Image (cartoon, rainbow, N blue to C red):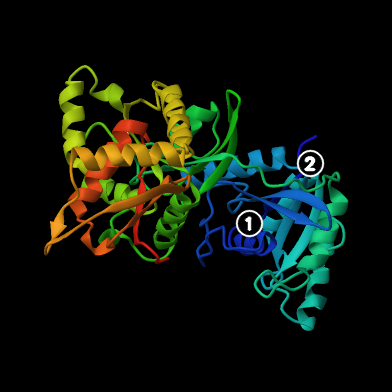
């Protein structure tokens, strides 16, 4: 038995994402007063009165979509309805019953799914009277709610748990989290679909298709991992207001949630300033990273791979530890290599070095290249320990932390990598004076 799935369905701009965020308890979906903001399905797990549910936010449904994007949204909503055990049909008390509401109601009646009718924007007692008109949709008792003001959402959740099979909450599983990041239109969603082997997110040959971070639990071999597909990240100076601003923030938060980031670039042009910008975000967050050069099938026969790799290494020299893979998501080439590399990086991030072994190696490192002197005072490394994993964090007790020069810090990091590996992940080195926290 799997966790019951509840999809929030309705026409554009009735407050589906606001309700989703309210039920989940945090701002997960993008909220913008613009129809069509939510395009892909967005999933989140909740628990209510000892019942576990998966809530799905969907795009605004138009039964007769006027554009390609609207048709793609309709397809995503149709998939969500098919997957769901129950539906929240959200309508708007301010607008009243519209022809679109009637068409969607007919679609839901034909689906045979349990439907909970929620009337949104009921902010006061007077509007509760207006909510009664939705009995005309013949979908049971309408529940008046205000997602924005958190009004009657408890009653809505009570109705939901009655509409779906009982499933007790489970403790959160400790699994590897992989964020797929990159600038717009390099093939991130296509890579995710190639990994999953099915159309999980909308894939379109235009920038900005994925606006939310999309989470998918995926089993690979004997490991479960969480895959996070994100919106494309632009340089700060090129980020537009509104939706794109939120998308960039969502992508950056996805990086912070991840263990490993797969930075997707495009083979038809060199590593760009935007790519380096994103790599910098990953490094600053101390996350593991691998570089996936997508669309390699377009230039593979024309390019010298070693020269191409050398140029990437030159530009990405501040992350020389990051593996570089050449793939084609469209042709499904190199997909298993991406997953294998991500798993290796995750294992490296969780590697722990025994204190005795670490101090022996640090002694050898300092003997081979003595610490520098400043103003007649010489740096002394007195003791070392690995304080944490994921990311690997090393604390060095020294006589004076102010004597640690950047170049000697880099030398120690390079030597730790040479001795112990730590491929694909940054190392956090902390130097503290003896007797100081």
Kindly indicate the quadrant of the structure image that contains residue 353. Answer: top left
Q: Which residue is drawn at 28% across and 35% down?
A: 266
Q: Which residue is drawn at 50% across and 64% down?
A: 34
Residue sitting at the far left: 375
- Measured from the top left, where is residue 253 in percent x and y? 46, 56
**Residue 232 in sight in this render:** no
- For the N terminus, which image quadrant? top right
Q: Could you tell which of marks 1 and 2 lies nearer the N-terminus? A: 1
Residue situated in front as seen by the camera: 257 or 123: 257
In the image, 406: left or right of 52? left
In the image, 76: left or right of 230? right
- Measured from the top left, where is residue 430 in percent x and y? 35, 55
Secondary structure, mark 1, is loop
- Measured from the top left, where is residue 13 in percent x and y? 58, 63
- For the C terminus, which image quadrant? bottom left
Q: What residue does disc 2 label?
A: 110
Say whether marks 1 and 2 touch (CB < 8 Å): no
Q: Residue 11 carries which label?
A: 1
């Amino acid at each position: 038995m799997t966790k019951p799935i509840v999809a929030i369905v309705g026409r554009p701009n009735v407050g589906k994402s606001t309700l989703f965020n309210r039920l989940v308890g945090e701002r997960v979906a993008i909220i913008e007063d613009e129809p069509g903001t939510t395009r892909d399905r967005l999933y989140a797990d909740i628990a209510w009165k000892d019942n576990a549910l998966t809530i799905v936010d969907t795009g605004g449904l138009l039964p007769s979509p006027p554009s390609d994007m609207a048709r793609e949204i309709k397809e995503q909503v149709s998939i969500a309805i098919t997957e769901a055990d129950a539906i929240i049909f959200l309508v708007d008390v301010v607008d009243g019953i519209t022809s679109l509401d009637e068409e969607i109601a007919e679609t839901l009646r034909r689906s045979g799914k349990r439907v909970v009718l929620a009337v949104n924007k009921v902010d006061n007692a007077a509007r509760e009277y207006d909510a009664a008109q939705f009995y005309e949709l013949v979908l049971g008792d309408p529940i008046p709610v205000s997602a924005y003001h958190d009004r009657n959402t408890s009653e809505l959740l009570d109705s939901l748990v009655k509409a779906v099979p009982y499933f007790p909450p489970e403790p959160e599983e400790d699994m590897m989290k992989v964020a797929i990041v990159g600038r717009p239109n390099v093939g991130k969603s296509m890579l995710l679909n190639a990994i999953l082997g099915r159309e999980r997110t909308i894939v379109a040959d235009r920038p900005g298709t994925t606006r939310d971070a999309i989470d998918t639990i995926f089993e690979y071999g004997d490991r479960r991992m969480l895959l996070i597909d994100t919106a494309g990240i632009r340089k700060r100076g090129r980020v537009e207001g509104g939706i794109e601003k939120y998308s960039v923030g969502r992508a950056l938060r996805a990086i912070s949630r991840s263990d490993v980031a797969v930075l997707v670039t495009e083979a038809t042009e060199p590593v760009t300033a935007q790519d380096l910008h994103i790599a910098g975000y990953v490094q600053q967050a101390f996350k593991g990273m691998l570089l996936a050069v997508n669309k390699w099938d377009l230039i593979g026969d024309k390019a010298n791979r070693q020269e191409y790799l050398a140029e990437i290494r030159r530009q990405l020299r501040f992350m020389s530890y990051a593996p570089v893979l050449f793939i084609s998501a469209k042709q499904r080439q190199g997909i298993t290599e991406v997953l294998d590399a991500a798993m290796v990086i995750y294992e490296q991030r969780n590697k722990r070095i025994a204190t005795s072994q670490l101090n022996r190696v640090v002694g050898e490192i300092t003997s081979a290249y003595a610490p520098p002197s400043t103003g007649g005072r010489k740096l002394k490394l007195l003791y070392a320990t690995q304080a944490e994993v994921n990311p690997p964090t090393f604390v060095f007790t020294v006589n004076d932390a102010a004597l640690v020069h950047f170049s000697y810090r880099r030398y120690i990091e390079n030597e730790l990598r040479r001795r112990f590996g730590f491929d694909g992940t940054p190392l956090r080195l902390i130097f503290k004076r003896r007797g100081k926290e």
